[in-house]
Amino acid sequence: MIFEKLERIGGNRVVIALSAARLGDAIGNSILFIVLPLFVAKLPAPAFPIPETVRVGLLIALFGLVNAMLQPFAGAFIDRVGRRKPFILAGLTMLGIATIGYIFASRFSDLLFLRIFQGVGVAMTIPAALALMVGSSIKETRGGSMGIYTTSRMVGLGIGPLLGGALYDRYGFNAAFYAGSAFIITAIILVQLWVKEKPAQPSGTKPVRFQIIDTKLLTAGILGVSFATLVMAGSFSMMAVLEDQFNARLNMSAFVFSLAFSALLLSRVFTQVPLGRLSDRIGRKPLIIGGLLVLAPATALLGYATSASQLIVLRLIQGLASGGVAAPAFAIAADMAQTGGEGRQMSFITMGFGLGVALGPLLAGILAVYSFTLPFIIGGLICLPGAWVIHHYVPETVNIAEQRQQVHSPTDD
């Protein structure tokens, strides 16, 4: 009964399998969100003087930049090979090795190397998983399918920081690193056992010259959605680099900060699937634009929070707003994806997200040297051009009139 209900909203076997694996991967990776800033403060400073906030921002940004810049190349190879599962397994394995490697890190340069290694692993995993999602979902329920997938990721990203903060407070750094690698290993097992990939069938058409960056695939719609996901991710990821500053200003522990940090992610758990399904009915664009317009003031006000409760409420609003952007954005990109180019086109959407996660903390770390509130004001303002780009350049892929005809037309029992 449960599986039948899930299938009606886009939750078929492959979607559920990939979502469960994404849950384990997200928990393992997000445990580092809370632990890494504290770990940086513990290690000796590099030979050349860099403010601590900038060091943390650089560390977080490096992972995102490597991840984002390599995704188009990974997407191209995925399209070329025609197989997705091997890339997912290889990427998860790299993530697991890097996570356990933090136990042996003794210098800031060690952390830089491990973050690069993790970035390569994620760059292999995400385009492959989303390419599988495109081929395993249908347009009528794709918003729901992407909602389930992104909800699983949000559950993992919500649980991970809480677990990381609790393990650090009670047992120290190594316990958090061991737990993170264990969840990633679980994700590898789930992909191996549950994801069944059919070999690509020959099309019978004359092969064309393969291009890693094919400009024909970079439509205004794909680039517009990529930009929207970039500003969304940049605005809500700024908070991560300023953990020590928030804790000092609001007199919070690492665990309380993790509660506030995870509030965004946990709020998306309850809203992502409904908002994805709503985009199947009323269209993708209204939700993406509305989400960005709500995200703008919620982000700007973070720097003015005077208590942990205010911080948590603002993060909950950010979660609701970003939930209106994420699943519809991935769904509209999947709707526009061309056969044979799914890996490359979807990789640009995830590249936008990765760049946002990278540039947001880096920008926050630099701007916070001058003013604590400035990063969040800038983070809120950049959401507004994102909404404008979606309105002007991204086509709507859901035919509302056709949806209404399907609702009112008689159906066979």
Image (cartoon, rainbow, N blue to C red):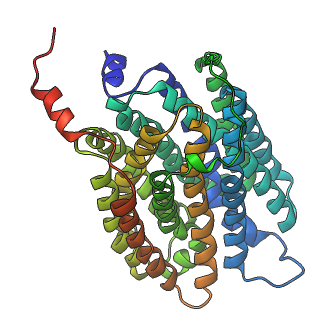
Residue sitting nearer the eye, 116 or 188: 116
Residue sitting nearer the eye, 409 or 114: 409
Q: In which quarter of the image is residue 188?
A: top right
Could one spot residue 38 in this view of the protein?
A: yes
Could one spot residue 179 in this view of the protein?
A: no
Q: In the rendered view, would you say 302 is above or below 164?
A: below
Residue sitting nearer the eye, 211 or 332: 211
Q: Where is residue 220 in the image (x, y as percent from the top left)?
A: 47, 56
Q: State how many labels appear.
A: 0
Q: For the C terminus, which image quadrant?
A: top left
Please tell me which residue is depicted at 79% across the width and 50% down the height of the picture: 117
Horizontal side of 360 relative to 300 (left or right) equals right
Horizontal side of 123 relative to 22 (left or right) equals right
Residue found farthest to the top: 413
Q: Where is residue 390 in the image (x, y as percent from the top left)?
A: 38, 60
Horizontal side of 219 relative to 295 (left or right) equals right
Q: In which quarter of the image is residue 312?
A: bottom left
Please tell me which residue is depicted at 63% across the width and 35% down the height of the picture: 128
Q: Position of residue 166 (x, y in %)?
A: 58, 53
Please tell me which residue is depicted at 30% across the width and 45% down the height of the picture: 275
Q: Position of residue 94 (x, y in %)?
A: 77, 41
Residue found farthest to the front: 206
Please tell me which residue is depicted at 50% across the width and 51% down the height of the picture: 219
Residue found farthest to the right: 47
Q: In the rendered view, would you say 151 is above or below 349?
A: above
Horizontal side of 114 relative to 268 (left or right) equals right
Q: For the N terminus, which image quadrant?
A: top left
